Image (tube, grey):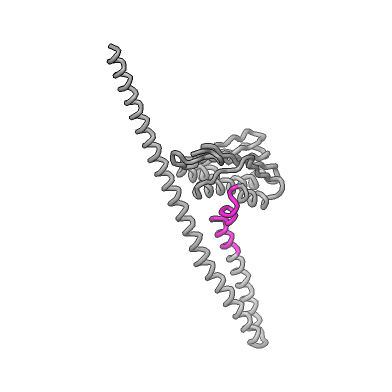
Amino acid sequence: MLGWARRSRVLRNGVQESREAASAARIAELTRSRRSVAEAYERERRRIERDLHDGAQQYFVAAAMALGEAEMLAEEAGTGSAPGELARELARARKLLGEGLTALRATVHGIHPQVLVDEGLAAAVGAVAASYGSHVQVRAPHPLPELPAAVLAAAYFFASEALTNCARHAPGAPVTVLLTADSELTVSVVDRGPGGAEVRPGGGLAEMSGRLEAFDGTVTVHSPAGGPTQVVARIPLLLHRGEPGLIGEES
């Protein structure tokens, strides 16, 4: 009887271990799949950045130089109404081209800001916050772990979009961005505006939520009438089993 009981326990333990192993394998495969999707997205974004920087931007610069030479030739063409009118049109074209180049550089910077690579998420979000004014504060009470590039980018663009929404719907209201990480990265943006924010189809909050779905991330909104409004993104770190999720954590 006792032998049968021991065999029964061993069998149950074996079944439990088998289920746990199968569950761990499914979680590992899901993590690998999501990480692959996120990394592919990040590679494509970097490719677009390189194409804009090394391709389109160089054509803009070359065109600006050619226009400068044309302006010099127009000035040397002599007097008369035609050359003067031509010079004015060339100057106007040069101004428009310069504005286009500035916009393109801003787009390239926005695709993947260098400060995000060099100094990390807190510094990159801080740079965005500083562009809105001193009423926007960024806090990261604990050092953030080393994050996959795709997770970093997702968090950065969420924070940027949330701050744009704050500036649009609660201009001048105090705003706080809080960055924390444990098993997931959390980005919380709180503004002291009038509240009443909603996730509408096609709206900015819905788009943010849709983008984070590729990472199994979520966006929650709490915005009672009268404020404050809190928009929170939670993004899994896409870590494989055994990878540390916190600085100083043993693998």
Q: Is residue 56 above or below residue 181?
A: below
In this view, the residue in front, 97 or 9, is 9
Does residue 129 appear to the left or right of 241 in the view shown?
A: right
In this view, the residue in front, 186 or 248, is 248
Number of marks present in the image shown = 0
Q: Position of residue 245 (x, y in %)?
A: 52, 40
| Residue at 55% over, 60% down | 108
* Name of the residue lying farthest toward the front: 3
| Residue at 29% over, 19% down | 7
In this view, the residue in front, 24 or 60, is 24
| Residue at 63% over, 70% down | 95
* Name of the residue lying farthest toward the top: 1
Does residue 216 appear to the left or right of 69 in the view shown?
A: left
Report the quarter where the N terminus lies. Answer: top left
Does residue 26 appear to the left or right of 142 in the view shown?
A: left
Q: Which residues are magenta?
A: 102-121
Residue 147 seen in the current view = yes
